[in-house]
Amino acid sequence: MASNNFIDYVKINCRSGAGGAGSHHFFRAKGLPNGGPDGGDGGRGGHIILEGNSQLWTLLHLQYQKHLIAKPGQGGGENLRTGAQGDDIIIQVPLGTIARDAETGEKKLEITEHGQRLILTPGGRGGLGNDHFKSATNQAPTYAQPGEPGIDEWVILELKLLADVGLVGFPNAGKSTLLSVVSAAKPKIADYAFTTLTPNLGVVAYRDYKSFVMADIPGIIEGAAEGKGLGTRFLRHIERNSILLFMIACDSPDIAAEYEVLLSELEQFNPELLEKNRLLAISKSDMLDEELEAEIRETLPTDLPTIFISSLTNKNIQPLKDMIWQALHVEGVV
C-alpha cells in the first residue's frame, strides 16, 4: 500500500438512532369494546458499532466519511407489537484502533481482535407501551413512554499498529532496508533523512513456517518528544510492539550516546516504553573489520543483547531473526 494511504487518525461525527415511541393503543373488538391497553414498545435506535478486521491496517476508508448517522427505531403498535429496531452502522477498523471522546480525550473502547464488535455510540432505548402501566387502580392508562433520543458526538479514532517487533532509530539507520530484506514489504529507501514518513509493516518468515510481524517506525531525532522532526506522531505505534529493536549505524560518532538519546525520547513520550524488551542491532557493519567491531562492542551496554548486521551483505540476518524469536518467546530479555 502506498505510504500516502496510511491514515492513523480520523475525527468522525457519530449520530445514533433515536428510540421509537411506545404505543398507547387500546384493544377494541366486536363484543369487547373495553379490551384494555395493548400498546407495544418502541424499537431501539440504531447503534454505531466498531468491528475489528485483520485485513485492514489503516483508517483511510474513514478519512472522507465524516458523518455516520444510524436509523431511528420505529414506534410500537397495537396488539403488543414492538416497533422495528433501527439499522445499526458497523464500521470495519484495523486491529489496534482506539476510540476517544473528541472533547475530553477519554478512551471509550479499543479493538484488538478480528471480528470483535463493540458499540461506539449506542442507540436510544425504545419507549414502553401503555400495556406496561396498567394496574389495579389504573386499568386504562393513556400514557406511553417516548423513545430516548440518540447520541450526537464527535469521536477520534486513532490506530496503534499491532506488531511483534518495532524498529527504533535515527533517520538513515537502515530500518527500511532491513525490513525490505527480511520481509516482502517495499518501504521507500533513499540516501537522505526521513525517507520513511509513515510506518511500514512486514511479515518476517522464520524457521519451520513460523513468522512474526515487524514495524518500521519513522526515524526519531533528538527533541522528537518536543515536536522536532516528525515529532511524536508515530511514537504511539511503538506502544503496541512486544519488543523494540534499536538500530544504530556503525558509522555513528558515538553509538552509546545515540542509544541513550533514543531511550530518552521514548521515556519523555511514555515512560512505560522502557519496560519493553530491547535489542540492539549495529547496522551497515559490512564496513567494519573484526578489530573495529570489537572496539565498538566495548563501548556498548553489557546487559543489552547486541548484534552487528548488514542488510546489504545479509551479514547476521538469520542470527538476528533467531535473537528476535527468542526475545519474543523467552522472558528476561532487557
Image (cartoon, helix red, strand yellow):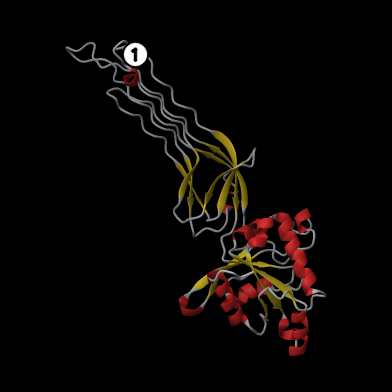
**On the rendered image, what quadrant is the C terminus found in?**
bottom right
Viewer can see residue 254: yes
**What secondary structure is marked by label 1?**
loop
Residue ranking furthest to the bottom: 290
Image position of 83 (left or right of 248): left
* Percent coordinates x, y for residue 199 in the rendering: 64, 62
Residue 200, image quadrant: bottom right
Residue ranking furthest to the left: 31
Viewer can see residue 193: no
Image position of 139 (left or right of 176): left
Residue 138, image quadrant: top left
Image position of 244 (left or right of 34): right
Total number of numbered discs in the rendering: 1
Vertical arrangement, residue 12 with respect to residue 30, above or below: below
Vertical arrangement, residue 33 with respect to residue 193, above or below: above
Vertical arrangement, residue 27 with respect to residue 9, above or below: above
* Percent coordinates x, y for residue 218 in the rendering: 69, 63
The residue beneath circle 1 is 141
Q: Amino acid at mark 1?
A: Pro
* Percent coordinates x, y for residue 153 in the rendering: 58, 36
